[in-house]
Amino acid sequence: MASVESFSEPVYVYEKPVRLWHWVNALAIVALAVTGFLIAWPPVVTSGEASEHYLLGYSRFSHFSAGYVLAVGLIGRAYWALVGNRYARELFAPRVHDARWWQGLVDEVRWYLFLVEEPRKHAGHNPLAGLAMFLFYVLGSLFMIATGFALYGEGLGAGSWAANAFGWVISLLGGSQQVHSLHHLGMWYLVVFTLIHVYVAVREHHLSRQSVTTTMIDGWRVWKDDRP
């Protein structure tokens, strides 16, 4: 196979663990958003015996379960960044020390603003996408995990693992109600980011010079032209 720099032969970018994490993580975020909305605005059930309904309980259980999936998945993804290929590390380590990375970032901003006719080729994340994933997804997810488990620890009670590990978050952020509000706001933050992420992925798949959406399915980056 030709080197990555040739940008002519397909490049194997996303390994199976990365692709599995991506789709499981996507499902977890959807489940967290839906159940989080139901927890904040629980539906009113007016028919039948009250003991036959357990909608909020099911919503909370599903929310907690999806939260575990999100947290464990992120830990697993961080591990694979250490043992996987070079592209597995991009999510956690934008190459801000590289002058060429900054030039690529400027070029991508100009491309997204329709100021240039053609974008550069990128085997992994382009600089702007990589930076956005780190700032908005990685850091945002860590905030949601910390605040979520802090609130979960309140329910489990003092002395529980969650209260011991994340109880400090409630004191740091100004109390339980403040953490509830920030956690709920963070839900909308991730929802908006996810919608933008999907839009950009579809846009780039059609307008850029390489495959995008299919790469997260089969792992291969395929080029649309042979030019550098």
Image (cartoon, rainbow, N blue to C red):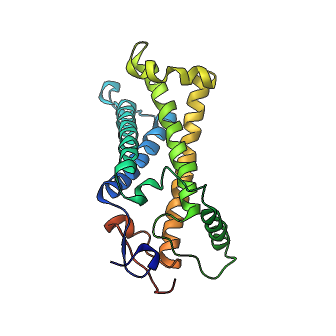
Vertical placement of residue 102 versus 184, above or below: below
Q: Nearer the viewer, residue 200 or 134?
A: 134
Residue 77, x across and y down, in percent: 38, 47
Left or right of residue 158, residue 100 in this image: right
Q: How many marks?
A: 0
Q: Nearer the viewer, residue 95 or 208?
A: 95
Does 218 sit left or right of 210 as displayed?
left
Q: Horizontally, is 193 left or right of 106 in the view?
A: left
- Please name the residue shown 49% across and 67% down the image: 201
Residue at horizontal 35%, vertical 54%? 84
**Is 64 or 17 nearer to us in this picture?**
17
Is residue 46 in view? yes
Give the camera-side residue of 74 and 162.
74
Q: Position of residue 12 (x, y in %)?
A: 35, 68
In the figure, residue 169 lies in which quadrant? top right
Quarter of the picture containing the N terminus is bottom left
The answer to whether residue 47 of the structure is visible from this angle is no
Q: Is residue 31 above or below residue 50?
A: below
Looking at the image, residue 172 sits to the left or right of residue 145; the answer is: right
Tell me residue 154's x, y (percent).
46, 19
Quick check: 123 above or below 46?
below
